[in-house]
Image (cartoon, coloured by chain):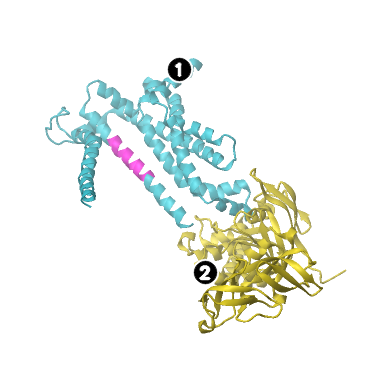
Chain colours: A yellow, B cyan
Amino acid sequence: MDEAMAEVLLSLRHISKNFGEGDVLQDVSLDVERGEFVTLLGASGCGKTTTLRIISGLETPDAGEVILNGQDMTDLPPESRPVNTVFQSYALFPHMNVEKNVAYGLRVRGMDKRAQAARVREMLELVQMSEYAGRMPAQLSGGQRQRIAIARALAPQPQLLLLDEPLGALDLQLRRQMQIELKRLQKKLGITFIYITHDQEEAINMSDRIAVMRGGRFEQLGTPEEIYDHPATRYVAQFIGRSTIFTGTVRSANGYSAVIENENGRFTVDSAHAEIREGEICDVCVRTERMRASRTPVEGFDLPATVREARYAGGHVLTYVTTRGGVEAVAEGVERMCDAPAAGDTVYLHWNPAQAAVIGGASHGA
Amino acid sequence: MAKRRKKRDLGRIASPVYLTLVLIVLYLPILMVVIYSFNSGRSISAWQGFTTNWYTRLFNNALMGDALRNSLVLAFLSAGFAGVIGTLGAIGLAHGHLRGGGFIESLATLPMMIPELVLGMAYLAVFTAVGFKLGMGALVLTHTTFCVPYVFINVKSRLIGMDPAIEEAARDLGASPMRVLRDITIPLILPAVVSGMMLAVAMSLDDVVISFFVTSAETTTLPLKIYTGLRSGGTPEINALSTLMLAAIFVIVGLSQLLRARSDRKLYASR
């Protein structure tokens, strides 16, 4: 018995769903541990909202099972599941004031009036909205409605809170603030969150684990660090962060590093995380903030490029270059404009081999 | 440049002219009726002085009282039935992913488009064929039919304007489908139901054609009274009755629109 082994709260097993126009979800499986913050990240139409609706019971899967606490919930209606949702549009009841909105989940469960009032007070305090108990939803700002929607969903003490792009309608500053608050709330209450977003920055900042979705499947499931540093596919590499991807043939490889060559030149990567063999074709993803452009060639690299433009980006300079093979890349590193290369100069691209990710053989490419 | 200014000048002249024409054609006859209801002479073309005599006579006419009672009973019963049927229909069509929903919807709103004459004749034919007694029962049945679309359309547009996530949120929080209907859906569509029923009352109150076919001697309604009164020459008393009905309809329709606008504003403000 391993006591440190975390308990699985929710498991999705081989979920498929089809709305009659091609598959929306194809064989999706996911285990979520108690207390975990898992984000489903993807572009619109990737199936993330459908996955969430299947967990809440607002949608039934064509195949597969939804298991919560070891119990099969696949056929339970939404009102019988200990799961609550924060909707993208907040979906506050427009004819009820804040207090009644938050109390609704308790009222339908038949909780006694005094206990209801106490719980509502506690929830409003939690989201710092106590003074607004008597207001109608129409009298609240977007951020305030958001807080009420969260308080309402948390009031019945769900085992699992589902959040469908809850910050999508807020402006950037408020969104950043709410990200921090939500994360704080989740830690404090220890409730398991499943969070949907199309904003990769939000996903990376908040999640314990991220599932990158595409075309109704999980493209990659891992910690933010794993997904950022070791994207499993080209799609993940391009969707998350800014990067340049070089495709090339492996010229030599030992257990630690590999030399790869293509029409742009030759470069070195750390191959400890990837199984690559000589002669294979693979993609290498280099994050913009790790790409360097120097005026002289660097050991292990032969990637000459012509500078198109250097632009100050606050604290650092971004150098936009075109390689011999026509790849457009961006490099960071220089701090001041006066040190930046001029348009038309030749520079040599390089990076710390340990910080480039090998995406894998040709079979991975998509 | 010059051409554009010319066009604009044309618009500046044309739109007041258009407006004046519309107002004259539409409201002058109505205004005449109202004015001559206060005429002391029996003529409906020559003004002979102001009087409220005709109104007094109208109120003292026992037959008019009966007609008023008939009209009100008919209007409120039909609007009530139409309110229930139209609301249930709209909720059912908005929620059930019914096959042929569009077709059913067209069927439900068709009574608004069918010529009243045809509808009245059809009802008369059916009632005669099955031996259904003409009178209040027949009147309520037919009026309910043409009142349903007013409620149906009103409620349905309200349901379409509603964020479906609101009802989903209620279920997500633990409410059964019946509970959602009671706590969320009905309170939210109620203003639309009431405004639809008010329109239905207005429609029923001024119907002549359909009532004409299915009424009996004892169930004469106010509009029928006006119609028959005009056929026998028309009196200032009829003008007075028309004026009162006009006022009632204006008030009902106005209130209905006001109610709708106010509640719509509330619903959208909370988005």
**Dot label at residue B125:** 1
Q: Which residue occupies the foreground of this view, A160 or A365? A: A365
Q: Which residue occupies the foreground of this view, B65 or B259? A: B259
Dots 2 and 1: beta carbons under 8 Å? no
**Dot label at residue A172:** 2
Q: Which residue occupies the foreground of this view, A128 or B67? A: A128
> Which element is circle 2 on?
helix
Please report, as a chain letter, where disc 1 is located: B
Assess whether residue B247 is covered by the magenta stretch: yes
Image point 64% across, 58% down: which residue?
A: A84
The CA span between labels 2 and 1 is: 69 Å
Q: Identify whether A313 is placed above or below A262.
A: below
Residue furthest right in the image: A1
Q: Is residue B11 left or right of residue B261?
A: left
Can you say which quadrant of the picture contains the C terminus of chain A?
Answer: bottom right
Image location (x, y in percent) of residue A335: 55, 82
